[in-house]
Image (cartoon, rainbow, N blue to C red):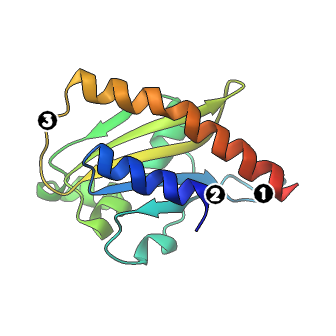
């Protein structure tokens, strides 16, 4: 189990999320961006591994394209959102928050908090999430250096 997986498990419990995932570009240098869920915690199955997204598609793709946090609520009751967000459909998530992980002005990954039941997150909760991101960025850098 990688350090990123351990970090996700710890933060999922701390933030009371049902699902925590990290999407990254897995395409080779000369290929078009392909986003995949590379690390997850709280998943109900391995079906997330089949999801392949392009920039602008799905929750991760929207966050990647805009470089901004994206939220979706009441996903399970909206058939359009179920089609638009395959990770929410496969993991039965009703609320999601996607956060870009940006390094040197470039989006490197997308962190997704998912909840199967509606939950009101307050500002203090999101402050804790954003405060933890530098730790994740460090782990991503370390993982990147291992691949070189």
**Mark toward the start of the polypeptide (3 vs 2):** 2
In this rendering, the answer to whether 143 lies above or below 69 is: below
Q: Position of residue 114 (x, y in %)?
A: 30, 51
Q: Which residue is labeled 1 in the image?
A: 31
Residue located 82% across and 49% down the image:
145
Q: Position of residue 124 (x, y in %)?
A: 26, 23
Q: Whole-Å distance between the Cαs marked 3 and 2?
A: 32 Å
**Tag on residue 34?**
2
Q: Secondary structure at mark 2?
A: loop
Q: Which residue is labeled 3 in the image?
A: 120
Q: Position of residue 120 (x, y in %)?
A: 13, 35
Q: Whole-Å distance between the Cαs marked 2 and 1?
A: 8 Å
* Disc 2 to disc 1: CB gap under 8 Å: yes
- Graded by Cα atoms within 10 Å as few (under 14), some (14 to 19) or many (20 or more), the crowding at tag 1 reads few
Q: Whole-Å distance between the Cαs marked 1 and 3?
A: 39 Å
Residue located 74% across and 47% down the image:
142
- Graded by Cα atoms within 10 Å as few (under 14), some (14 to 19) or many (20 or more), the crowding at tag 2 reads some
């Amino acid at each position: 189990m990688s350090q990123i997986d351990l970090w996700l498990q710890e933060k999922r419990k701390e933030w009371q999320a049902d699902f925590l995932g990290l999407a990254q570009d897995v395409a080779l240098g000369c290929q078009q961006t392909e986003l995949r869920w590379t690390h997850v915690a709280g998943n109900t199955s391995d079906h997330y591994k089949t999801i392949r997204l392009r920039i602008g598609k799905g929750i991760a793709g929207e966050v990647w394209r805009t470089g901004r946090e994206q939220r979706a609520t009441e996903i399970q009751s909206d058939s359009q959102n179920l089609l638009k967000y395959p990770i929410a459909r496969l993991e039965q998530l009703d609320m999601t928050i996607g956060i870009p992980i940006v390094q040197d002005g470039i989006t490197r990954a997308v962190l997704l908090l998912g909840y199967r039941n509606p939950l009101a997150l307050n500002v203090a909760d999101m402050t804790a999430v954003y405060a933890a991101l530098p730790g994740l960025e460090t782990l991503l850098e370390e993982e990147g250096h291992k691949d070189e």
